[in-house]
Image: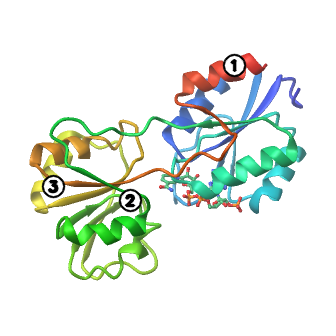
Amino acid sequence: MSADGAAHHVLILGGTTEARRLAEALARESSYRVTTSLAGRVAAPVLPPGGTRIGGFGGPAGLAAWIGAHGVTRVVDATHPFAERMSFNAAEASRLSGVPLLALRRPGWQPGPGDAWTFADSLSGAANLLPGLGGRVFLTTGRMGLHTFADLDGCWFLVRSVDPPAGPVPPRLEVLLDRGPFTLDGERELLARHRIDVLVTKDSGGSATAPKLTAAREAGIPVLVVRRPPVPEGVAEADSVAAVLDRLRQQA
Ligand code: NAP
């Protein structure tokens, strides 16, 4: 039982829409106290209800110590499917602290009829494949891995990210600062206005950023999809906020 009488203190490792939805759902139930942790990458994050903390823990041992010091009884890793380091840290911290961990992963995207998708196992794999697919690139993989594409001087890039890129970037690029959700009309217009001939995306899943895939299909534009890293071995997975709530109730 947590200090305020709630049966559980749930630590949500956040940074996604699903993490915020989960915090909203748990905050409505008196049996849960909820704290969301954010990495601090985004300058003005949308904060969920309940407690929040911002910044790294200092690796798995730091996270395990935080869990112990704050009476956390359940951890939900609701980070982005590509936040591989944090998911690894969460698995290690769960092992060290003995506090159960559940990973919330929205389903990945699947190609449909008319899609021309090529898959890469990593951002650097995508950078290798890119010159063979197109020259005017809509790059939507986030600002953090931009250095991976920095040597591709034969391509022109439209980079869309929440905050401005820092560090090495491709020599020919335009940056568009924007945050989803995006509309199909908006994505159609963007592809046409910039004469995009290839789209690069992570397999993030979810609906907020999916319209670009429909717009690319309609325009006959190939899509280079970076596959997700696996959830760490032995970590239980749920694919929706409702499924996490069910699991937490079963464990109550
Ligand atoms: P990452 O590479 O997996 O993690 C790097 C370090 O950042 C971790 O070791 C940890 O530092 C800290 N960290 C990450 N998530 C944290 C959290 N929720 N709370 C506290 N510390 C956290 O992470 P990333 O890919 O840079 O992503 C950072 C954040 O942005 C995540 O919260 C993720 O959900 C969100 N996000 C990521 C992507 C993406 O494509 N990767 C996209 C959208 C949103 P310590 O070791 O010091 O604890």
Mark 2 Cβ inside 8 Å of ligand 1: yes
Position of residue 215 in the picture relative to residue 120 (left or right): left
User: In terms of image quarters, where does ligand 1 lie?
Assistant: bottom right
Task: Determine which of the numbered discs, if any, sits on residue 29 in the image.
Answer: 1
Answer whether residue 133 is visible to the viewer in this image. Answer: yes
Measure the C-alpha gap from mark 3 to mark 1: 44 Å
Q: In this rendering, is residue 57 above or below 100?
A: below
Q: Residue at 32% across / 78% down in the picture?
A: 170
**Amino acid type, label 3:** Leu
Q: Residue at 52% across / 43% down in the picture?
A: 16
Quadrant that contains the N terminus: top right
Residue 27 x, y percent position in the rendering: 66, 26
Question: In this figure, which residue is indicated by the disc labeled 2?
Answer: 141
Question: In this figure, which residue is indicated by the disc labeled 3?
Answer: 191
**Amino acid type, label 1:** Glu
Measure the C-alpha gap from mark 2 to mark 3: 16 Å
Residue 118 x, y percent position in the rendering: 28, 54
Residue 182 x, y percent position in the rendering: 29, 44
